[in-house]
């Protein structure tokens, strides 16, 4: 019985210490961290500058050329994949191989998507 009373007293003392630690943390947050964070945000807002660029065409022209090249390569690979899978589908159809036909149809769809990506991106304005 005495042991239970001692344990209960020590638990109360620990809870009091824990709550005082929580108060210290909140006090630290209110006194130090919040003003420091607000000061950092204010400094970032005040130190920003606006850049005025005169001619961006010199920078974007090589990127546009690279984009056009990559889209053309994807389209060409798509046409090659499409042709390969059409021939594969024809052979599978002739041999009545349903699993190969299914695989070839998936390849045909992928080839059409790759071949048509350039026209779709042009239509969207890219």
Image (tube, rainbow, N blue to C red):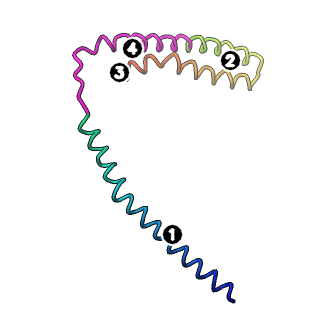
Q: Secondary structure at mark 1?
A: helix
| 2 or 1: tag closer to the N-terminus | 1
Marks 3 and 2 close (CB-CB < 8 Å):
no
Is residue 121 toward the left or the right of residue 57 in the image? right
Residue of label 4:
63
Which one is nearer the viewer's eye here, 13 or 94?
13
Which one is nearer the viewer's eye here, 7 or 73?
7
C-alpha gap between disc 2 and disc 1: 73 Å
Rendered view: 4 above or below 121:
below
Residue of label 3:
125
Q: Quadrant of residue 30?
A: bottom left
- Residue at the spot 61% in from the left edge and 82% down from the top edge: 8
Label 2 neighbour load within 10 Å: few <14, some 14-19, many 20+: many
Q: Point out the frontmost of discs 3 and 2.
A: 3
Chief secondary structure of the magenta span?
helix
Label 1 neighbour load within 10 Å: few <14, some 14-19, many 20+: few
Q: Secondary structure at mark 3?
A: loop
The disc at residue 18 is 1
C-alpha gap between disc 4 and disc 1: 60 Å
| 3 or 1: tag closer to the N-terminus | 1
Residue of label 2:
89
At which x and y percent is residue 25? 43, 61
């Amino acid at each position: 019985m005495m042991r239970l009373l001692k344990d209960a007293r020590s638990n109360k003392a620990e809870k009091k210490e824990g709550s005082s630690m929580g108060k210290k943390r909140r006090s630290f947050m209110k006194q130090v961290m919040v003003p420091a964070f607000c000061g950092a945000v204010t400094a970032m807002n005040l130190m920003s500058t606006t850049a005025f660029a005169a001619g961006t065409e010199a920078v974007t022209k090589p990127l546009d050329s690279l984009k056009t090249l990559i889209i053309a390569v994807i389209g060409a690979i798509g046409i090659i994949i499409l042709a390969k899978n059409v021939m594969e589908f024809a052979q599978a159809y002739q041999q009545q191989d349903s699993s190969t036909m299914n695989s070839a149809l998936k390849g045909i769809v992928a080839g059409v998507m790759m071949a048509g990506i350039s026209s779709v991106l042009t239509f969207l304005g890219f």
